[in-house]
Amino acid sequence: MFKPALRAQERRGAKMWRLNDCSAGNLRQLRDRVWKTEEHVILQGLLAGELSKLRPIFQGRKNFSLVLIDWWNSPFWFSKNATYLIFHNYNGIMVRTGQARFLAEDRPPWFLFPEKAIYYELAGGLLRPAALATAPILDVVKRWQRMRDTVEPRRLLYFPFPIVAEDVPLQEESPQYDFTNMGATMGLWFVRDAYASAWLNFANLYCDRQRLIDLIVRFDGRPFKVFDRRRNSSFLPWEELNRIIRQTRFIMCTGGLHQNSVPKFLEYACLGVPMIGSMLPFEFPWLDSCLFPVDAMKITPAELKLKLQEALDLYPKLRANCLAMRENLFKLYDAERLLDLLQEQIDGRPMPPGYLKSRP
């Protein structure tokens, strides 16, 4: 996900610094480097805890921009003080400019029930009651932060995820499955950003994906063939993942309750595999022609079974749509083109066609 953009930046003369860990020695080296120059620094691919440890370095210096993936998870000080906020997901720009709300409709369950006995899910489940109890107080703090924040649309830039053809090779495979899940079903975060409610702390924002997959798995062998990655906990190399994806007629995918543009949408389309799940409200206008829409939070099992058959009837058309747009997607989401897109936005030019949906 990061490598194509990093390579493109290096070709344009950007100097890279990899923060392998936040040890005192590494932080001291980074501080010495950035304080000896007035060059602009772009922070990318850093976790919230890592950013927090970098704050003393940039507190007085500023002169940095921030690339945001899960923007609601980033420390608000960095979002407030960055020269530019570079969003991989357009919902961050819509929420910040008051044109949309984070989680506009559906709400996650009150409590979290982990699917696996892994530390992060177990910790999220245990912390969820405390998160609900403290949410009213934290939301007062967030409201105060928003009141003190100045939203400048010119600072908000859209930088979609890049893709390269080598990562998603197109090969002929005989379909082995009707429906496949390759995605995670637990999306848990401590919501640090002031524009997302503290009520969502340690809630499962992927509960729509979880419900859709759980419902489809019910029909495995009755009469559909279903592959669910959750049943296979062993590591699958990238080539093997792509092979299984190419062997399915439909792959399950949603952006979560927060309607996020996950890279998987782009990867699946370029592999020539149509999707079943939820559409996106703001970006990826091409997605509508290669996705069979299902409202995972409202559909009943009986309704879904009929929808699954309807989707299979439309499979040839949707697959053809994916294949027809493959080459154009490589051009739209080429890393070099996306860097040009950033500069065009900085220069005040509007987004070109192909990236965003038109709005009434």
Image (cartoon, grey):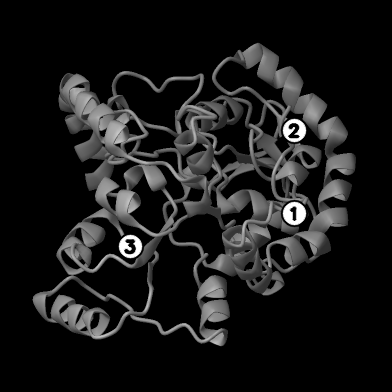
**Of residues 159 and 321, the one drawn nearer to the viewer in this rendering:** 159
Q: Is residue 195 left or right of residue 12?
A: left
Label 2: which secondary element: strand
The tag on residue 352 is 1
Q: In this view, does 19 lie to the left or right of 296?
A: left
Q: Which amino acid does label 3 sit on?
A: Leu
| Residue at the disc numbered 3 | 46
**Of residues 264 and 360, the one drawn nearer to the viewer in this rendering:** 360
**Rendered location of residue 148, percent (x, y):** 27, 36
**Rendered location of residue 91, percent (x, y):** 53, 39
Q: In this view, does 38 lie to the left or right of 236?
A: left
Give the vertical position of 1 relative to 94 (above or below): below
Q: Distance between the residues labelled 2 and 3?
A: 34 Å
| Residue at the disc numbered 2 | 292
Could you tell me which residue is drawn at 71 percent across and 70 percent down? 165
Q: Can residue 118 be seen in this view?
A: no
The tag on residue 126 is none
Q: Tell me if mark 2 has few (under 14), some (14-19) or many (20+) residues whose alpha carbon lies within 10 angstroms of its own.
A: many
Q: Which amino acid does label 1 sit on?
A: Pro
Give the vertical position of 341 relative to 232 (above or below): below
Label 1: which secondary element: loop
Give the vertical position of 245 relative to 215 (above or below): below
